[in-house]
């Protein structure tokens, strides 16, 4: 008589009560109920008065936690989930959202004590200059000193001071440069919004695979925008420097 291979019995899917699910996800039951009220979780299976949650609920909670840690808001997460309930659609929409809002800068903050600041800036470390730096959004002030959002910008500022350029003049140029940089960023954002992401403004859901396609496009366009901005700045400097030099020569000869 031939032996019959016994197949292992399939394990039943794990189910959780509210407290068990919250503990497995590393959140409080209050947070879990809040997510459920916001419709971030699909309805549980009801058995009498007991609500049972499955592995899909746990995966959703872990995804929400990861997205919050990556800077997404609950409102944005709700929109992503509402835009596509299948796991693939949500994953693709999340990838698209990350490609849109992921940082363009990779600046490293730097902290300096008041003694270090006094050594670097001397009598130019005035209340007015400090207030202007704060207004431009570059520094936060503590009892021990300041934290600057960009080590590169801070080092450039110190180097300019060492070239006998007043800090007030550096800050004045910084404010103007920030305004022009914002204007250039607005141009590129408009280009990407109008030419690539127009489908996101409609009421219809994105076709299958479209979110992934847009993500790939954005990842290709981002370095191109940097290239254009750098090239345009270099060409503009060439034009302005030559024009200024010609004007200086004209005045000397006149």
Image (cartoon, rainbow, N blue to C red):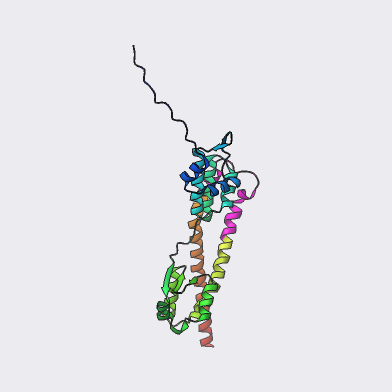
Q: Quadrant of residue 82?
A: top right
Outermost residue toward the front in this view: 49
> On the picture, is 5 further left or further right than 245?
left
Front one among 197 and 48: 48
Residue pushed farthest top? 1
Q: Quadrant of the C terminus?
A: bottom right
* Front residue of 101 and 235: 101
Residue that appears at 50% across and 68% down: 233
246 or 235: which is nearer to us? 235
Decide if residue 234 is on the left or right side of residue 39.
left
Res. 242 in view: no
The part of the chain drawn in magenta is: 188-215
Q: Residue furthest right?
A: 203
- In the image, residue 172 lies at what x, y percent? 53, 77
Q: Name the spot of residue 206 as percent of width and height, x first.
A: 59, 44
- x 44%, y 30%: residue: 11
Residue in view at x 43 percent, y 77 percent? 114
Say if the magenta span includes residue 214. yes
What residue appears at the point 61 percent right and 43 percent down from the top-left corner?
A: 205
């Amino acid at each position: 008589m031939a032996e019959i291979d016994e197949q292992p019995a399939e394990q039943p899917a794990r189910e959780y009560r509210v407290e068990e699910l919250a503990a497995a996800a590393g959140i409080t039951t209050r947070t879990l109920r809040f997510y459920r009220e916001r419709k971030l979780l699909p309805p549980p299976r009801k058995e009498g008065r007991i609500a049972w949650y499955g592995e899909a609920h746990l995966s959703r909670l872990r995804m929400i936690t990861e997205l919050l840690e990556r800077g997404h808001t609950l409102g944005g997460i709700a929109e992503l989930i509402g835009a596509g309930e299948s796991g693939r659609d949500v994953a693709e929409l999340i990838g698209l959202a990350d490609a849109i809002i992921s940082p363009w800068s990779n600046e490293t903050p730097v902290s300096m004590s008041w003694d270090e600041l006094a050594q670097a800036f001397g009598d130019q470390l005035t209340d007015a200059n400090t207030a202007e730096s704060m207004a431009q959004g570059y520094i936060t002030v503590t009892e021990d000193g300041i934290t600057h959002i960009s080590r590169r910008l801070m080092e450039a500022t110190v180097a300019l001071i060492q070239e006998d350029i007043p800090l007030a003049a550096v800050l004045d140029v910084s404010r103007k440069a920030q305004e022009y940089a914002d204007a250039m960023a607005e141009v590129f954002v408009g280009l990407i919004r109008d030419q690539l992401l127009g489908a996101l403004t409609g009421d219809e859901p994105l076709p299958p695979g479209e979110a992934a396609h847009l993500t790939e496009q954005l990842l290709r366009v981002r370095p191109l925008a940097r290239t254009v901005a750098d090239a345009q700045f270099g060409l503009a400097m060439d034009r302005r420097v030559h024009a200024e030099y010609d004007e200086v020569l004209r005045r000397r000869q006149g």
